[in-house]
Amino acid sequence: MKPLIEQEAVRATAIQGALFSGLSEDLTCQLFAIATVRQARMDTVLFHQGDAPSHLLQVVSGLVRMTQINAEGAQTTLRLMRSGDVLGCVAAIQQFPYPATATAVEDSVVLSWRAPQFLGLLKQHQAIMDNALAIIGTRTRDMVQRVGDMAGRNVERRVAAALLRLVDQAGTESEEGIAIQFPVTRDDLAEMAGLTYFTVSRTLSVWQKQGLVSSGRQRLTVLDRTKLTAIAGGRSRRE
Amino acid sequence: MKPLIEQEAVRATAIQGALFSGLSEDLTCQLFAIATVRQARMDTVLFHQGDAPSHLLQVVSGLVRMTQINAEGAQTTLRLMRSGDVLGCVAAIQQFPYPATATAVEDSVVLSWRAPQFLGLLKQHQAIMDNALAIIGTRTRDMVQRVGDMAGRNVERRVAAALLRLVDQAGTESEEGIAIQFPVTRDDLAEMAGLTYFTVSRTLSVWQKQGLVSSGRQRLTVLDRTKLTAIAGGRSRRE
DNA sequence: CGTCACCTTGATGGATATCAAAAACCGTGG
DNA sequence: CCACGGTTTTTGATATCCATCAAGGTGACG
């Protein structure tokens, strides 16, 4: 386990998240004051799909995966969340069960607010409300986009789109290309694209030969983002 | 074309929508005052995917379909919206291009707010903000749910789920069953389920023989909602 | 160096898209 | 009232694509 995180360091990172965006010094303090810091080792579940939304979380460091299991029992990875991202936002505000399960993909630190306390502050301060609205709005756009994309039947496109999403949500630029900072198995990608890992593996093999990606065991680097974007359908996923 | 709608009648219907929920008499008036009433004949496009979000709309009467075209050129019907539903909410508030196209499926009446004016009022009144947040939150939950469902590969489930959504969004209960109030082609359902209309047709044929639905040309009635729900995966789609 | 997890590749089958054509349905106009 | 044309729906034949099954390879780590 990592050493205990400094309160100050957490704060410095946390207030860069969208939830704190544009808040007054005073309000920032208030919001931070009612949060607790929680550490989650790799593979820890932060909350389960279907649970009552007792908390709202913000990732401070590390990486958290949101997965959903549907009626068929198929698991989908909805998205990955990293520093600054807010989890359980809709659920906490609307008091609906969490629609997905949040799991730490690597050792992570999160800020945690109890739903009632958070809601109290939310109702009192327009500025926080603004931020919440922005966060949820962005989430909605994301999901609408995905519903449209999922309708596509072309496999290459789906994989490319999933890979680009992955890169946006957890990638790090370097000279060679964009590397993904945590262990990605073929299975993970398959879940994101709604395919089997056999198909993903085959697709990646082809791309590797073409020099679009470089992949090894639990490791993945995008070498040619432009071409991948073209395969995914031309539009860039970046906002 | 229908005769001109009475202002009063529009108002009476409109204020039952989620956007007006719980507003004071005074605020209701203010909000209504800056809206304009617009009539849209069947097949009129209210706004196009990709357009700048100049307006926020609320359906007063009739029915509006939201469709999205993805990179592959495949069209998806995201949802149908009827009296009280708000369109273009996220787009207008966040000033992002409309993610989908809104088309009147039947002659409809909508309230229309210019985005800047609406935003002005939104920023001033917590109550409207609350409503907007609730509307967007609900929309998000819906979409998250759908992303999960789309991952399923079982066709019967997809069709059943699409049909139930349709029924929830545009169905009318009667003695026999739940009828869908406007012309539904197989193609429409196919778009909602992400399948071809051939497949949908075959599926419906089977169900018709089993007495689950009754369908004809552009007409569809659900006779046994329970069984359909079971096929869709057990969970009811109602909130 | 052996075990385990992950990855690759091949072979196969099944499900659904696609293509094709005919049937049912509806409104229209003779 | 009936014949006609267009649209929607059904049904069948075929092809394609991907999931599934199977087997072997590869790398990491004790």
Image (cartoon, coloured by chain):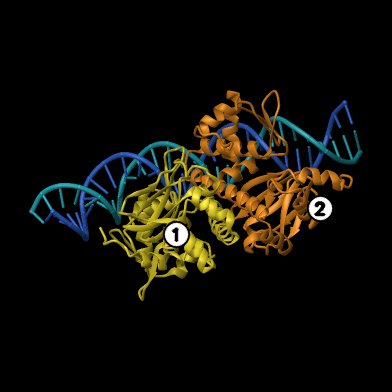
Chain colours: A yellow, B orange, C cyan, D blue
Q: Are marks 1 and 2 in contact (CB under 8 Å)?
A: no
Looking at the rendered image, the disc whose residue lies closer to the viewer, 1 or 2, is 1
Can the viewer see residue B1 in this picture? no
**The N terminus of chain A - image quarter:** bottom left
The residue sitting at the bottom extreme is: A175
SS assignment at label 2: strand
Question: What residue sits 51% from the left and 31% below the top?
Answer: B231
Chain under disc 1: A
Badge 1 local density, few (<14 within 10 Å), some, or many (20+)? few
Label 2 neighbour load within 10 Å: few <14, some 14-19, many 20+: some
Q: Residue sitting at 57 percent across and 60 percent down?
A: A134
* Residue B165 percent location from the top left of the image: 60, 39
From the image, tell me which residue sits under label 1. Answer: A33
Residue B13 location (% of width, % of height):
78, 43
Q: Helix, strand or loop at disc 1? A: helix
Q: What residue type is labelled 2?
A: Val
Q: Name the residue under label 2.
A: B37
Side (left or right) of B165 relative to B86? left
